[in-house]
Amino acid sequence: QVQLVESGGGLVQAGGSHGLSCTVSTKIADYNAQGWYRQAPGKQRELVATISNDDRTNYADSVKGRATISRDNAKNTVYLHMNSLKPEDTAVYYCNARSVSWSGAFDYWGQGTQVTVSS
């Protein structure tokens, strides 16, 4: 069974930087894309950033220019680094791995890690 384990959550001051890591129990190169999503209290889960296996990246408008997603295939780890953090970045951040086949797309999720940005 695939496991995704996030780490790096915590309390950060507004304007600061922070990084998250996600280690996948299987080869991330076997997935079509990896990504980070977040869910704030009372809100739906939303995309933060994704990276495809050919290294194309995609960012939500709300984090564009402040976030960088990257991965290390040798370590089966995906990273998210954010700077200029804002209180509205406070959320539970979830790691995602997506597998696409002829039958459709399947998403694997981590358990989430809390990031709290204090003003």
Image (cartoon, helix red, strand yellow):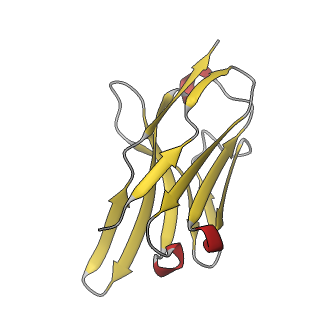
Furthest residue in direction bottom, as rendered: 102
Residue 30 position (above or below residue 96): below
Q: Is residue 56 visible?
A: no
Residue 45 in the image, given as x and y percentages of width and height: 37, 41
Q: Position of residue 83 (x, y in %)?
A: 74, 36
Q: Is residue 26 or residue 57 the one in the foreground?
A: 26
**Total marks drawn?**
0
Residue 6 vs residue 119, the one in the foreground: 6
At x 32% / y 25%, what residue is drawn? 42
Q: Residue furthest left?
A: 103
Which quadrant of the rendered structure holds the C terminus? top right
Q: Is residue 3 visible?
A: yes
Q: Could you say which is closer to the camera, residue 13 or residue 27?
A: 27
> Percent from the top left, x then y, of residue 11?
59, 22
Residue 110 vs residue 82, the one in the foreground:
110
Vertically, is 30 above or below 15? Answer: below
Q: Residue at x 34, y 64 (%)?
A: 107
Would residue 64 appear left or right of 102 to someone viewing this image?
Answer: right
- At x 42%, y 57%, the residue is 4
Task: From this view, report whether residue 49 is shown above or below residue 100.
Answer: above
Image spot of residue 81 (x, y percent): 68, 45
Residue drawn 43% across the image and 58% down it:
96
Name the image quarter holding residue 54.
Answer: bottom right
Q: Give left or right: position of 105 versus 118.
A: left
Q: Residue furthest top?
A: 119
Specify the quadrant that holds the N terminus: bottom left
